[in-house]
Image (cartoon, helix red, strand yellow):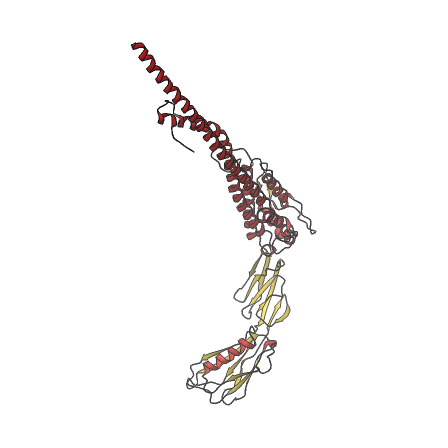
């Protein structure tokens, strides 16, 4: 494409053909380019705002999951009247039944401990010896029954040999050997071996050279013996998870007076998660309301998805899910509105009456859990199984935002296709502009030739006339 001002360069005319060509091309290209630019801007802004909407739905999924995970909903306030004697905590698998429990600890569980013959600081084995360690529930492979201790081994090396054997043959058994320095004159070193607590976990340890190094009982194994509301219970461990439903008991010392453990549902953490859910839902709803509403000057979100039916469907689907009645399982609570989660006259989700939630959660926690989670440990985002009102909202948010056939990926694909079409329009317009620019320049070249010929003829005529006038 030439940009030479042809006519002026040849001195044939005073017409600025370069400017004239530019103006004519601009007049032709301008309106079409404006439409293309508007389409491109619309698609770019829409794609950007869909990405923001995806972030919003991901946040809504997380917020809904927090109130749709039964492990988080099964929270109880657990109070011990003397935690130095008995500590109590909530199990994650079930809600502790509301009530008071009287506990009396008679004996604590203890492991059997075996001690070696006292040894001098410079002690070493004078002959090879074999130790046989018996651990309840552990079967050792043939040929590996004995712990072999070679000649010249120190007490520390004997301990290492015992622990190495345990790691190979009885890993996870809870049995361990250690070397203690009692400070006794002449023979301060003693090896102590102990296993798990409880009568049924009592270990044995025999030496084939007892005169060189033997083992005797230091403390006997014992079960924990305690009473719950007057009923005597025994367990092999001081951590008891199966005596009181929903509670873990940590027995720490023998009681002088009965300890009271009190339990009741704890809505505190759940309330905070519900507040977060409501706030997140409203943030997503407000974003969609603005994006699908009228355009506002200098606001990149307002009206960016104005005519997008898919975007409007997200709002209606989320609202319907919040208002849905849930009766997948028999329950006395079937709607979020029963818990004080309602829409106001402006369509904003509110949680103004938290006392309704607290009362329902404390009086019938299992029914509230059924409503919110359907008892699922966490929402079934991949299988699509029923997950409660909140859980289904989490699943819906995930499916709309993250799955391959979700609403947002489909919307993004639509606007990416629009950009591709716009690119084709731009290419076609650029080629058209090149053609008409060349046409205008060819036309002006022809015009230049005609004007040049006319000017030459005019000059010759003028010269002839001047000569004739002299005659």
**Pick the front one: 12 or 328:** 12
**Viewer-side residue, 284 vs 229:** 284
Quarter the N terminus occupies: top left
Query: Is 346 drawn above or below residue 67 in the view shown?
Result: above
Image height check: is 462 above or below 19? Answer: above
| Residue 471 x %, y % | 30, 9
Q: Is residue 14 left or right of residue 442?
A: left
**Horizontal and vertical percent for residue 106?**
58, 72
Q: Residue 7 in the image: state x and y as whole percent.
A: 38, 25
Say whether residue 171 is visible.
yes
Depth check: give the residue in front, 449 or 223: 449
Q: Quadrant of residue 219?
A: bottom right
Among all residues in the image, which is located at the extreme left?
A: 470
Outermost residue to the right: 330
Q: How many marks?
A: 0
- The answer to whether residue 182 is left or right of residue 111 is left
Residue at 36% x, 15% y: name it.
461
Q: From the top left corner, tell me how far across and down residue 110 is, in percent.
A: 56, 75
Asked whether residue 110 is in view, the answer is no
Pick whichever, 148 or 353, lies toward us. 148
Which quadrant of the view contains residue 414? top right
């Amino acid at each position: 494409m030439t940009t030479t001002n042809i006519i002026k360069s040849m001195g044939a005319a005073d017409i600025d053909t370069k400017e004239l060509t530019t103006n004519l091309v601009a007049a032709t290209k301008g309106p079409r380019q404006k439409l293309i630019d508007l389409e491109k801007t619309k698609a770019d802004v829409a794609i950007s705002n869909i990405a923001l909407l995806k972030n919003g739905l991901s946040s809504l999924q997380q917020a809904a999951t927090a109130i749709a995970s039964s492990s988080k909903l099964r929270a109880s306030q657990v109070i011990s009247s003397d935690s130095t004697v008995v500590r109590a905590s909530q199990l994650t698998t079930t809600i502790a039944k509301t009530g008071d429990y009287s506990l009396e600890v008679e004996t604590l569980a203890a492991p059997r401990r075996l001690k070696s013959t006292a040894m001098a600081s410079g002690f070493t084995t004078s002959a090879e010896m074999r130790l046989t360690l018996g651990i309840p529930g552990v079967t050792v492979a043939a040929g590996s029954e004995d712990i072999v201790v070679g000649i010249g081994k120190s007490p520390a090396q004997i301990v290492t040999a015992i622990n190495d054997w345990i790691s190979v043959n009885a890993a996870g058994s809870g049995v361990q050997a250690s070397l203690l320095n009692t400070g006794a004159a002449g023979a301060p070193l003693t090896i102590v071996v102990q296993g798990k607590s409880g009568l049924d976990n009592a270990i044995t340890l025999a030496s084939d050279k007892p005169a060189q190094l033997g083992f005797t009982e230091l403390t006997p194994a014992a079960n924990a013996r305690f009473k719950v509301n007057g009923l005597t219970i025994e367990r092999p461990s001081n951590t008891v998870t199966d005596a009181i439903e929903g509670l873990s008991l940590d027995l720490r010392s023998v009681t002088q007076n009965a300890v009271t453990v009190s339990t009741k549902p704890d809505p505190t953490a759940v309330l905070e998660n519900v507040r977060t859910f409501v706030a997140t839902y409203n943030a997503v709803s407000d974003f969609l309301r603005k994006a699908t509403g009228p355009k506002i000057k200098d606001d990149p979100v307002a009206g960016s998805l104005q005519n997008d039916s898919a975007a409007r469907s997200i709002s209606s689907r989320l609202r319907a899910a919040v208002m849905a009645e849930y009766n997948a399982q028999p329950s006395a609570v079937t709607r979020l509105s029963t818990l004080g989660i309602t829409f106001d006259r402006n369509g904003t989700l509110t949680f103004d009456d938290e006392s309704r939630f607290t009362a329902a959660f404390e009086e019938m926690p299992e029914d509230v859990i059924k409503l919110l989670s359907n008892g699922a440990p966490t929402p079934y985002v991949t299988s699509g199984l029923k997950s409660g009102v909140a859980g289904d909202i989490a699943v819906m948010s995930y499916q709309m935002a993250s799955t391959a056939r979700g609403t947002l990926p489909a919307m993004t694909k639509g606007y990416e296709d629009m950009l591709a079409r716009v690119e084709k329009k731009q290419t076609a317009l650029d080629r058209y502009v090149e053609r008409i620019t060349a046409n205008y320049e060819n036309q002006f070249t022809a015009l230049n030739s005609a004007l040049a010929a006319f000017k030459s003829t005019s000059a010759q005529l003028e010269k002839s006339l001047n000569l004739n006038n002299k005659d």
